[in-house]
Amino acid sequence: MSDPGQRKLATIFSADVASYSAHVELNEEGALSQLAALRSHMDGLIHLHGGRVANTAGDSVIADFQSPVEAVRAAVKIQEAHRKHNETVPRNERLNFRIGINIGYVVLTEKGDLLGHGVNVASRLQSLAEPGGICLSENVEQQISGHISFPVTKIGEHYAKNMQKPIRVFSISSEPESRASYILRRLAANWRRSSIRIATLSVFGLTAATAVYVFSIDNNMIVRDGLVRKVLNTSTLEQALTFFPDHVKGEFGKSTYFILSTPALSFDDGMLVAKQFGGYLASINSREENDFLYQLSLPQIGFWQTEQTDYGPQAGGPVIGLFRSLAQTDPTKGWTWASGEPVTYTNWKIEGPENSAGNQWFVQFRNGRGAAPVNKWDDIGGSRSSFIVEIPLID
């Protein structure tokens, strides 16, 4: 171990449980028991691969390794062990760690804790990982290249607090291809063969607790390659907003939202755009949050559309981040938030979710029997007109 106060270069491993506070609120005893079980796997594998657990606080863990290759191998084995453990745990009680790994300078305290910019970056990478996933900085990806058999995917550039340059983020996983990675792979293939190019829209300056913007995208913008390139290559929020004249800002609690409006966006595309924004399709956890977002959407032209159906007119509003497993045929089961949070609040319309056509996998604000908007939810399938993206608070 280095002397206290010494500055050294290290591979920093940061881990934290997704939505841990919500799990504790629902079942504190069960959450603490599951955390202890997962930590036993984690601590043993960190030690086995030459790492040292440094900082611990609640559900968070900071460790350091001399070898980035061993740090990544440990992370992969930890997530594999946790997935195996969770197979024996009821779905609503499962805890999932996010892991971030970075190479950077740290300072060792007298208590053995690690501090410094390198730790901050590792923690930021952890917050960008999917529940059960692993994110790496570019310098880690370069060091493990040729030494790790698991696939590594670049997922974009992200800004952390007090950083002048973005972090280039990579993900690694040993599990079968996830829905999100499938989307990324499919869109990458479309890039190669389509005249429509989709790139990353980087949004900067998201340090406020909560902000809501509504983006309207003209139909022609989607198919006009030149304008799309200009929009998606902007480097600041202010520049991006010049292409979206219909936008509003609203605040609720400590969350940040964007409502995206486009006639041609599928749920999968919405998930990808949300991830590029540094967030996810919105999870709604209270009636107050639900009513706020509903009221925010009402004055905006284009965020609610009326469809003519066999049952008469139906008003459809923004899509949220609730979706159902493709393996689940019962419309009342298998629903999960894109953020990985447990489903503790729902606001279905009467008889919903109904799966009336056998393919309702996603959720939007919708009036199932009428042309007037309502603040209820309905399960839907196919493309929709607007999406609510939630941006987590950046500490």
Image (spheres, helix red, strand yellow):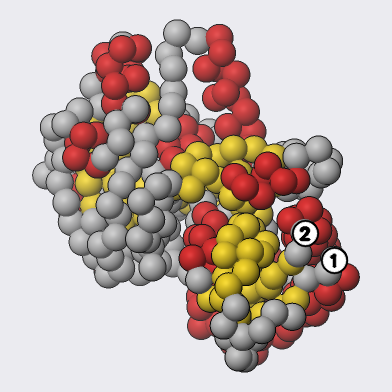
Residue 29 vs residue 267: left or right? right
Residue 266 seen from this side: yes
In this view, the residue in front, 49 or 228, is 49
Q: Secondary structure at mark 2?
A: loop
Relative height, residue 148 to residue 21 (above, below): above
Residue under numbered circle 2: 67
- In this view, the residue in front, 253 or 192, is 192
Q: Which residue is mark 1?
A: 49
* Mark in the foreground, 2 or 1: 2
Vertical relation: 226 (above or below) 176: above
Give the quarter of the image for residue 151.
top right
Amino acid carrying label 1: it is His
Residue found at x 47% / y 42% = 157
User: Residue at left 75%, top 76%?
Assistant: 52
The residue lying at 44 percent from left, 23 percent from top is 198
Q: In this image, 28 relative to 350: left or right? A: right
Label 1 crowd bin: few (<14), some (14–19), many (20+), radius 10 Å: some
Name the spot of residue 81 as percent of width and height, x first. Answer: 82, 64
Quadrant occupied by the C terminus: bottom left
> Which quarter of the figure has residue 49?
bottom right
Residue 232 vertical position relative to residue 379 in the rendered view, above or below:
above
The residue type indicated by label 2 comes to Ser
Q: Are marks 2 and 1 in contact (CB under 8 Å)?
A: yes
Q: Is residue 72 left or right of residue 341?
A: right
Counting residues from the start of the chain, the first of labels 2 and 1 encountered is 1
Q: Is residue 318 visible?
A: no
Residue 150 spot, x, y in % from top left: 79, 42
Q: Residue at x 51, y 35 (%)?
A: 268
| Residue 223 or residue 87, whichever sits in front | 223
Q: Assess disc 2: are there few (<14), some (14-19) or many (≥20) residues with their C-alpha within 10 Å of its C-alpha.
A: some
Quadrant of residue 65 in the image?
bottom right
